Amino acid sequence: MKTIIRPLTDLSKNMTAIDEYAVKKNLPVYITKGGSSYLVVLSHEHYEKLQEEIAFLKRLATAEAESRRGNLIDVDDLEKDLDKIILEEARYDDGGKSVTGKFES
């Protein structure tokens, strides 16, 4: 990924260039103040993607920790639980009509 570094004065004097990189090219723009790192400008899309990646990595780390502690779920039990959830959702979506049978994958 290309690194874009701009001085703080560009926020007011050259916002078009920052917009070009941050929004149109979806690249982070590193802003410096007095020659040192100060802030980063991101498009909303880029920010949301980073937040999703962080959330995924947290879930992955939690799952890995659970696995190391031996907190595992049997695949057959998981399938049964998912079937129950799907059936309950189908009943709710079908106005309360009874739905029977197992969903096959």
Image (spheres, rainbow, N blue to C red):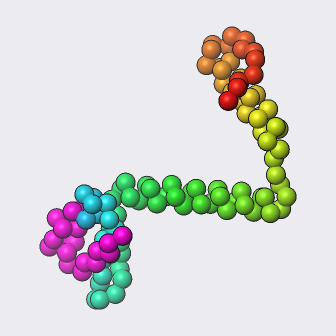
As drawn, 7 above or below 46:
below
Towards the viewer: 3 or 18: 3
- Say above or below: 73 vs 7: above
* Image quarter of residue 54: bottom right
Please name the residue shown 25% across and 57% down the image.
24
* In magenta stretch: residue 19: yes
Q: Which residues are magenta?
A: 1-20
**Is 55 part of what is drawn in magenta?**
no
Q: Residue placed at 52% from the left, 58% from the top? A: 53
Q: Is residue 8 visible?
A: no
Q: Is residue 17 above or below residue 101?
A: below
Q: Residue at x 76, y 28 (%)?
A: 84
In the displayed structure image, the side of residue 23 where residue 62 appears, left or right: right
Percent position of residue 26, x then y: 31, 60
User: Which quadrant holds residue 33?
Assistant: bottom left
Q: Position of residue 79 (x, y in %)?
A: 76, 35
